[in-house]
Image: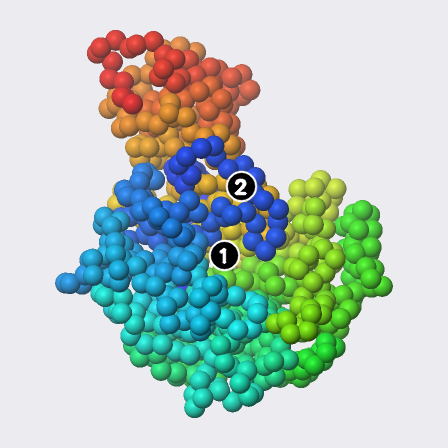
Amino acid sequence: MYGHDDASTRYSPLTQVNTSNVKDLTLAWTYHMKKEGPRPQKMGPAGRGGGRRLSEATPVMVNDTLYLPTPYNTIVALNPETGEEIWTYKFEKGRPASRGVSYWPGDKTTAASILCGTSDGRLLSLEAKTGKPTSGFGTDGYVDLKAGADNGFPHAQYDMNSPPSIYKDLVITGAAVQESPAAGASGDIRAWDLHTGKLVWRFHSVPLPGEVGHDTWPGDSWKNRSGTNVWGLMSVDLKQGLVFLPFGSPTYDFYGPDRKGKDLFGNAIVALHADTGKLVWYYQTVHHDIFDYDLESAPVLMDLKKGGTKIPAVAVLGKNGLLFILDRRDGTPVFGVEERPVPASLAPNEEAWPTQPFPVKPEPLGRMSFRPDEIATVTPEQKKFCEDLLATEGGMENRGPYTPFGLKLTIQFPGTIGAANWPGMSYDSKLGYLFVNTNDLADVGKLVKNPDGTDPLYERHSPWGDYARFWNNDKFWPCQQPPWGQLWAINANTGEVAWKIPFGTIPELDAKGVHGTGALNFGGSIATAGGLVLIAATNDHIFHAFDAKTGKLLWQTTLESGSYTTPMTYEAKNGKQYVVMVATGGSFFDMTAGDSVFAFALPGGLPTAKVAQSVAANSTESPSPSTQTTAPPPAGSAAMPDGAGKAVVQKQCALCHALTVVTAKHASRKEWEQVVNQMVSRGADLTDDEIDTVIEYLARNYGPLDQMKAPPAEANVPQQ
């Protein structure tokens, strides 16, 4: 399932790939999600999320099948050993949720199903085996989620971009709704019968009169309130029958004089009885949010040991970089929380909450303030750029943690991308470590008055757009001193930092002798019983493997584009452990683009069908018909034509995979150059002359079929 388990630990028990051999990982297969036209090469301008073909998907692996949504309006089922398509479901309208799908094993009356939300506010159920709409679920496999949730605003935003949660025969859904204006579609949480699609229960995220929390909404401020939603990921305690919900902020995100209260259940972690939707407990992490400091990453359920006592706990992390570790039975902080004074709002009629909760432990995982003497000095040019930026409109201000936007340009640490975001955490129960990658990146902005009668009356703006950052936008370099990206290991049993390291590299600065800056990143990690933390996420396009115990970098490889999601790993029927990720570039700070699903494995005995799809992760060309192959011939090295280069191919290629991986393929000379260069980058010991000889041999003997002479009848050549 998504995140490996209902507790959202993102921990794999597999050990085949481990600290001693991860350095040998090699590309096993590649699947291209774009099926028509040229491959994508560049995203649109960086902004709140990058280009329109960005994928944030993590596949799920069930019964020897990989399932994932694509940004090309499809859900696909793939062979986990080869990347071959088993089935494809094409959307006639709308798009599938960008982050993933969920699986339900079915029962005697309903087939095993794949569940996925859509961009137009529907919930889809497909039969896992066939990819056809699940019989009896909703209307032709769809349930209209917007019905009953739009609060009388039929054109309000309502979509679902994260996988739903499954509990017994219920599917539990949240939604992405608007951030402005205040009135709009509801962020209520609902559960649906997996057999029929009928509504079973509903939890009001903005409490109605008589419900717990209603008194935090003065007057009629609760009516038709939008936001206060779970647009991210939930977790389920199957043993206790609880579902844990990380809520975002109420609308409007940056100015709230029309909601002068704590605004429950905004920015709260809420535990419900999963079978009824009844409230068990809640804990609010931000009061009266005017910062857009949503929760939304999956709460991690774990068992801690404190003073010899076992504590069932839940860890929840928000955009503000504060990690709350709570007793999941009642929401009591395990290591204590302090209410600390924070700056008042200087905006007209706004009343910022005078205190905010800060965990005693762990320490904040991201920067929360800025002083002018902390301006970035990594290069003279960057220093000058940032000093000029800071001086805009007479100089920007920051008054410490939780500085709200006012009428003057303000630096707000962290910004709305967050120190952390929905990709959240992974957890190694053996070590007791939570792993978190973070950014140190601020927003800049101020509140500007709209015409009287407008909702909201004051709205966030800046000279550089509505969602501007405190950075050099051309380079994606923040304007405060590094580190700009970090990877943390938190000992959940003590609340202390086990280790932290700069995360990511900036080649331009490394070349100038400026090291250890870290890089901006967006994506998540997984932990494995092999002692590894596996993560891509950085805008240097590198996929990394770290030692979970120490943070030491053990292996890395460069992808064709950035991967801004979470990898996953599984063992296929052939006994091999694969590590899979989606890489499409884009996101907030990457202009490259791609359409690939990459699978890595240890060398030796790689499956051969469709291996030719993995021609080159760095190719920017659309795969030509000549690169598509069927099953390889049974012959091995004996079937290889004689000539200069044959011996070298036999020696080097056989070190990592069967020779049929090569002999089953026909490709252009350029494609063979890319393949051989990849071999060298992964450690193939070839001289320059041998590289040229191998390329010449492969291009001459295994070029495109339409350019080759017809073989003798007895030659067992693969057919197109």
- Judged by depth in the image, the label closer to the viewer, 2 or 1, is 2
Q: Which of 114 and 341 is in front in this view?
A: 114
- Element marked by disc 2: strand
Residue 199 figure quarter = bottom left
From this view, report whether residue 49 is shown above or below residue 290.
above
Instruction: Count neighbours of disc 2 (C-alpha within 10 A) and say few if under 14, some if 14 to 19, many if 20 or more.
Output: many
Q: Which residue is drawn at 48% across and 35% down?
A: 39
Is residue 528 visible from the viewing direction of this image?
no
Q: Mark 2 points at which residue?
A: 593
Q: Position of residue 673 (x, y in %)?
A: 49, 23
Q: In the figure, is residue 570 to the left or right of 230?
A: left
Residue at the left extreme of this rendering: 108
Q: In the figure, is residue 560 to the left or right of 1?
A: right
User: Are circles 2 and 1 on residues that touch, CB within 8 Å?
Assistant: no
Q: Name the residue under label 1.
A: 524
Q: Which of 704 and 300 is in front in this view?
A: 704
From this view, report whether residue 710 is shown above or below residue 72.
above
Q: Where is residue 622 in the image (x, y as percent from the top left)?
A: 45, 30
Amino acid type indicated by mark 2? Ala
Q: In the figure, is residue 524 to the left or right of 8?
A: right
Of pointers 2 and 1, the one earlier in the residue sequence: 1
Is residue 506 visible from the viewing direction of this image?
yes
